[in-house]
Image (tube, grey):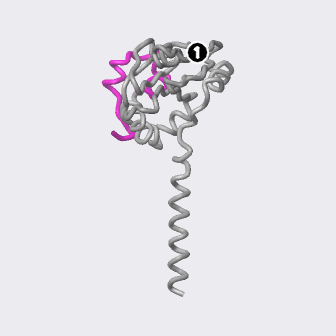
């Protein structure tokens, strides 16, 4: 009887832990550039684009820490359209009615060059405002750093308060 009860208890604990981790596994609702463009054309809200490469160590770190944070996931999914762009993707990307191709000479896709305004740093986080203006931030971002950007651009602060003033008054609630 004891072994049977212990087995049921262990199964219950494993199921419960799995259920709580389930939402996190779903993660950020990353979509194709086509899908984001279509949705953005229907309803304007900020877009976040994660520009990465397969070989980039800090891109993987950001995926495993920053983009895996429950608060980051929830905020992005609620306030942004989100797309991931492999800067070295050899397939063409359709973005805002234009086709962006791979440039073999530079081993990079034109979309990555366009969104980062030529500042090819991996990873790069690009925030595109409802007016279409891209803001590119190069390098890996911590949860706190990304929280500040998301809340500034996705929380209706952009254009109402200067960035420096926002940074001075910002209090992180999501962690490091």
Magenta segment: does it hold 105? no
Q: Which residue does the image show at 41% across and 36% down from the upper left?
A: 62
Q: Which residue does the image show at 36% across and 22% down from the upper left?
A: 166
Position of 23 compared to 124: left or right? Answer: right
Q: Closest to the observer: 163 or 58?
A: 58
In which quarter of the view is residue 80 placed?
top right
Q: Position of residue 156 (x, y in %)?
A: 50, 22
Magenta segment: does it hold 154? yes
Q: Position of residue 17 (x, y in %)?
A: 50, 60
Marks counted in the figure total 1
Identify the magenta region.
149-176
Element type at marker 1? strand
Q: Position of residue 137 (x, y in %)?
A: 40, 21
Question: Which residue is situated farthest in the left direction here?
Answer: 168
Q: Position of residue 121 (x, y in %)?
A: 39, 22
**Image quadrant occupied by the N terminus:** bottom right
Task: State whether residue 60 is above or below residue 157.
Answer: below
Position of 109 compared to 96: left or right? Answer: left
* Residue 139 visible in the displayed image: yes
Residue hosting label 1: 100
Q: Which residue does the image show at 40% across and 26% down from the upper left?
A: 122
């Amino acid at each position: 009887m004891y072994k049977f009860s212990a087995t049921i208890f262990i199964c219950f604990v494993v199921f419960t832990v799995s259920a709580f981790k389930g939402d996190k596994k779903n993660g950020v609702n990353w979509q194709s550039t086509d899908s984001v463009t279509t949705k953005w054309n229907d309803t304007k809200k900020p877009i976040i684009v994660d520009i990465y490469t397969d070989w980039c160590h800090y891109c993987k770190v950001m995926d495993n820490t920053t983009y895996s944070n429950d608060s980051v996931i929830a905020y992005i999914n609620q306030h942004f359209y989100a797309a991931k762009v492999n800067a070295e993707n050899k397939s063409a990307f359709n973005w805002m009615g234009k086709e962006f191709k791979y440039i073999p000479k530079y081993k990079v896709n034109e979309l990555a060059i366009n969104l980062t305004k030529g500042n090819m740093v991996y990873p790069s986080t690009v925030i595109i405002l409802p007016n279409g203006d891209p803001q590119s931030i190069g390098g890996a971002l911590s949860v706190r750093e990304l929280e500040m950007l998301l809340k500034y651009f996705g929380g209706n602060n952009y254009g109402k308060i200067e960035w420096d003033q926002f940074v001075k008054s910002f209090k992180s609630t999501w962690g490091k």
